Amino acid sequence: MIHFRIVIKKRRSWSMGNVNWEMFKSELEREDSMTSPESFARLPGREQLESLHGWICIAMDKATKRFVRGKSKRAAWWTEQVKDLKGRIAKARKKWQLTRKLERNLDGNERCRFEYQGLLRHYKKAIKETWRYC
């Protein structure tokens, strides 16, 4: 069995919602007709694979829209304080859920719930504050 690995430098994607499949098929046929089967068969396996990949990319470029996925932009309002509060809220919520399941002591459960709700209010207030300065 032969294994090939293609390395694509940029992560490219096509919008698959509105593909013109007839155009895709005709472009693949056009690319295929430009190369004779004998010359294609004489190519090493890796070059055959790269040729096929290139043909598919050309056909998809003509048949649909393309976009490059990149890193998403950082939210301007997301600060270290908000990040810290988000983590503390997650821990408080898990603690509250565990006490609700495990403890029969309602005081412990209520204390954890109030702690969680207080952190949640503080978190929402912190987000509103950071939004003001964006």
Image: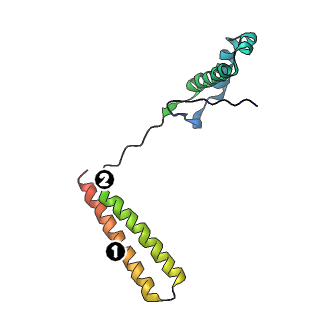
Q: Is residue 31 left or right of residue 125?
A: right
Apparent side of residue 44 relative to residue 16 in the rendered image (left or right): right
Image spot of residue 62 (x, y percent): 57, 23
Under tag 1, what secondary structure? helix
Cβ atoms under marks 2 and 1 closer than 8 Å: no
Q: Amino acid at mark 2?
A: Trp
In 3D space, how far apart are the residues under numbered discs 2 and 1 (Cα atoms)? 21 Å
- Residue 6 placement: quadrant: top right
Q: How is the image coloured?
A: rainbow
Q: Is residue 22 above or below residue 119?
A: above
Q: Which of the 4 image quadrants contains residue 27? A: top right
> Along the line of sight, which residue is nearer the eye, 101 or 14?
101
What kind of element bears circle 2? Answer: loop
Q: In the rendered image, which quarter is residue 3 located in?
A: top right
Residue type, numbered disc 1 = Gly
Image spot of residue 10 (x, y percent):
49, 31
Nearest the viewer among 47 and 57 is 47
- Residue 104: horizontal and vertical position, in percent? 51, 88
The residue where tag 2 is placed is 77
Residue that badge 1 annotates: 118
Q: Earlier in the sequence, mark 2 or mark 1?
A: 2
Q: Residue at x 24, y 55 (%)?
A: 132
